[in-house]
Image (cartoon, helix red, strand yellow):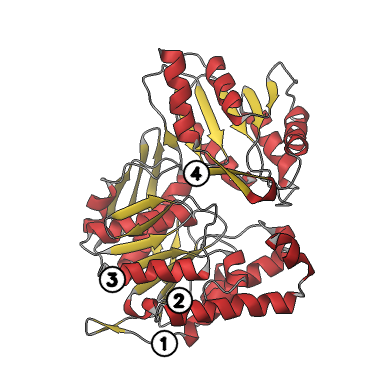
Amino acid sequence: MLALIKKFIPKKCLQLYHYTLAILANVVYRNPSDKLIVIGVTGTSGKSTVVYLISKLLEKAGFRVGSASTILFKVDKWEKINDRKMTMIGRFALQRLLKMMVKANCQYAVVEVTSQGIEQFRHLGINFDVLLFTNLWPEHIEAHGGFENYKRAKLKLFGKLKTETPKLIAGKKIIKTIIANLDSEHSKDFLNHWAEVKFGYTLGNSSSDEAKVVRAEEIELLGQGSNFQINHNPFQTRLLGRHNVENILAALTVGMSQGLSLSAMAKSLETIYGVPGRIEFIDEGQKFKVVVDYAYEPKAVEALYEVVKNVDHRKIIHILGSTGGGRDTSRRPKLGILAGSNADYVIVANEDPYDEDPKKIIDQVAFGARQAGKKLNHDLFKIMDRRSAIAKALSLAGPNDLVLITGKGSEQAIVVKNNKKILWDDRKVVREELVKIIN
């Protein structure tokens, strides 16, 4: 009903509604972000992983940390997997979480910031100190009415930094900082905004006239992780893929901006074994590999297949779908083409249809797989029920095969018509189905 009402409310009135809620939430909870060092992370992909890594590095350095991301909510030692199907929760919920961090004596809050959250002023009552830009490519285009509008929404966050109230915490002035991925063609647009200190990070030869450059060199991508160096300091990680080296470099740059040493962070990184729902291996003693990953748009799926090249495997069985609700419908056949071109078997299943016909979404993804040469009911299957799709994939897997299950990661629900949430966790369901075939 609320969604229907919003369709008939003029956009300016709706913006005023969101703005008023943001101001009111901040007043009710008495500006909790003024008492925390707040790190905001935005971009198209990698945000959640970067938030997770920043939180872990700061925590291992002895700080009390809180965070809010697609993956989880955290207040010092308390953690909860995000079950809200929202990356950036509502204004009152977010301010309440920040207040909890203050009460728990957290020094840092790490917040994943989305373009849609910015457009709805969910960032408005948060006094940011460090802003990090990961990357940018087309996403949520239907919602924003074009790529430039999407980009402009992200840039609003960085423009806000100059207006933030200066902070003095524990007798120390908190430096307003911008950090950007120099390997993105859009990095200059974000670095052009005011900050007291600016950093840029790169996996290549990118440079900057206005930012301190942090460069990863001697990069080795292995089947068990990656190795690289920063200023001749060696780093080892169990996280797979070049994109994760980039994510780690982003987190390390934040750490450097907060005074953490490279040697200390190198030791901390070795203790981080994985990120929930991000290239997460599920092992119940089966003779094949199962990976659950959040990747739901083409570039992320491409990056996942780059990782797969370094993982020992025989056949690949890929389960995927696509989100409904009008979200970037053009990517659906592209996802099918990617899976059809790289996997031996493709299974297209229900994901999060919202108010769209799930069969139509599945057909659009499967159309791309057929374009890539897959044949229906031979090496391409359309299975509406996601559990049945997972069971089918596991039944097709032989020794040393690799089952990829993408699109949801650690999400806790499937969203169907009228925003109804059905409890769901790909990782839990995979374990349940594996137990059936192993026993």
Give the residue type that dot 2 points to: Ile
Mark 2 to mark 4 CA distance (whole Å): 27 Å
Residue beneath the point at 63% across and 57% down: 137
Residue beneath the point at 55% across and 80% down: 159
Q: Nearer the viewer, residue 258 or 322?
A: 322
Give the residue type that dot 1 points to: Thr
Label 2 secondary element: loop
Q: Quadrant of the N terminus?
A: bottom right
- Given contact means CB atoms under 8 Å apart, are the residues at marks 1 and 4 in contact? no
Residue 182 percent across, percent down from the top left: 50, 64
Q: Residues within 10 Å of mark 4 (few under 14, many from 20)?
A: many
Look at discs 3 and 1 and give the one toward the viewer.
3
Picture disc at residue 103: 3
Please indicate whether residue 129 sits to the left or right of residue 233 in the image: right
Residue beneath label 4, please? 412
Work out whether mark 3 precedes mark 2 in sequence or the reverse, and give the earlier one. Answer: 3
Compared with residue 437, is residue 53 higher up or lower down, i.e. above or below? below
Residue beneath label 1, please? 165
Residue 327 percent across, percent down from the top left: 70, 52
Mark 2 to mark 1 CA distance (whole Å): 10 Å
Please indicate whether residue 165 sits to the left or right of residue 44 in the image: left
